[in-house]
Amino acid sequence: MKTLRFALLPAALLAGALLAQTATPPPPPATTTVGTGFDYSRGSYGLASDTTVTSVPFEVTYESPAWVFRAFTSWLTIKGPSAAALTGGAGSLTRPTSASESGLGDVYADLTYRGDPLGTGWHLDPTVRVKLPTADDDRGLGTGKTDYYGQLTAYRTFGAVTPFVAGGYRFLGASALYPLRDGAYGSGGAHFRTSDRTVLTASLDWRSRVVDGGDAGTEATLAVSHDLTDRWRLFAYAQKGFTDASPDVGGGLRLSYRF
């Protein structure tokens, strides 16, 4: 499952009223969020038969006023020949088995710095990410190599609309079985706040080809995030791919709880 990319909404919730007109407002408290859900994708990826991927993700996020740390993994079930689900879009690159396999996926960890807005009002947030090869590559659940990512996300809020654009570069661990290419990726779109509790998001994601002779990946995503309460949040998305390096269709749900 390709992890869906979102710019972080620049919302700073103040805890309590100002002590005086000239006093500096206190920063929002640090929070920890845990979540799980369900993801599904299906595509032929340029091969004769489809590959379907279902997963149950497990996520934890620690968020302070300036830093966001997130770690996540999933329990994967892959049925079909394509390795696109493991590599982020590899066209006709195949797994060592086309049988249905289930097991723990790779572990991802990323760190984002959210600084003050620039003079123009735009935010520019850098993110670094690492993929740890915890999935079993012999069973076609992972590549068996460590990957690294670096990314910048720019966003600014105009009333109820927050447009964003992100660009990054990935360094993929290659092997004889998975001869992967390093390359760039990007995303652009906007968040639309429709109420105090609901945000709609539309985005278009692109990434350069992962193997020689493969396609670049391109997908469109529609998503909705709704705060059920002050602590519980429900997130749902649907995805459509446009190349052989992308799933034909995908979607999923998340339920998270904030401490």
Image (cartoon, rainbow, N blue to C red):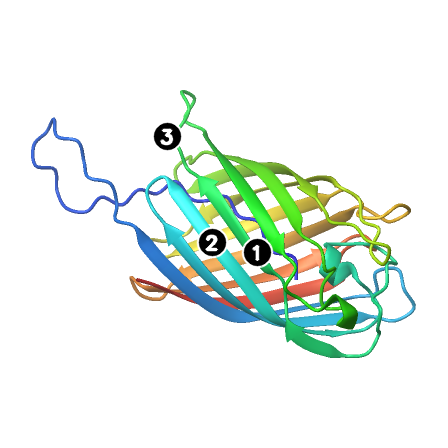
Left or right? Give the position of 173 relative to 204. right
Mark 3: few, some, or many residues within 10 Å (few <14, many ≥20)?
A: few
Q: Amino acid at mark 1?
A: Tyr
Please report the residue visible at 83 percent of the width from the left and 70 percent of the height from the top: 50
In this view of the protein, can residue 247 be seen by the observer? no
Q: Amino acid at mark 2?
A: Arg
The Cα–Cα distance between marks 2 and 1, rounded to whole angstroms, is 8 Å
237 relative position to 16: left or right: right
Residue under numbered circle 3: 116
Q: Position of residue 132 (x, y in %)?
A: 61, 56
Which of disc 2 and disc 3 is earlier in sequence?
2
Q: Which circle, 3 or 1, is nearer the viewer?
A: 1
Question: Is the Cβ of the residue at disc 2 closer than 8 Å to that at disc 1?
Answer: yes
Q: Which residue is mark 2?
A: 70
Depth-wise, is mark 3 or mark 2 nearer the camera? 2
Residue 108, which numbered label?
1
Q: Position of residue 95 (x, y in %)?
A: 83, 66
Q: Position of residue 191 (x, y in %)?
A: 49, 46
* Circle 2: element type: strand
The crowd level at tag 2 (other Cα within 10 Å; few <14, some 14-19, many 20+) is: some
First of labels 2, 1 by sequence position: 2
SS for tag 3?
loop
Instruction: Using the image as rendered, state which of residue 76 and residue 37 is in the foreground.
Output: 76
**Disc 3 or 1, which lies upstream in sequence?**
1
Quadrant assignment, res 229: bottom left
| Residue 72, x across and y down, in percent | 52, 61
CA distance separating discs 3 and 1: 26 Å
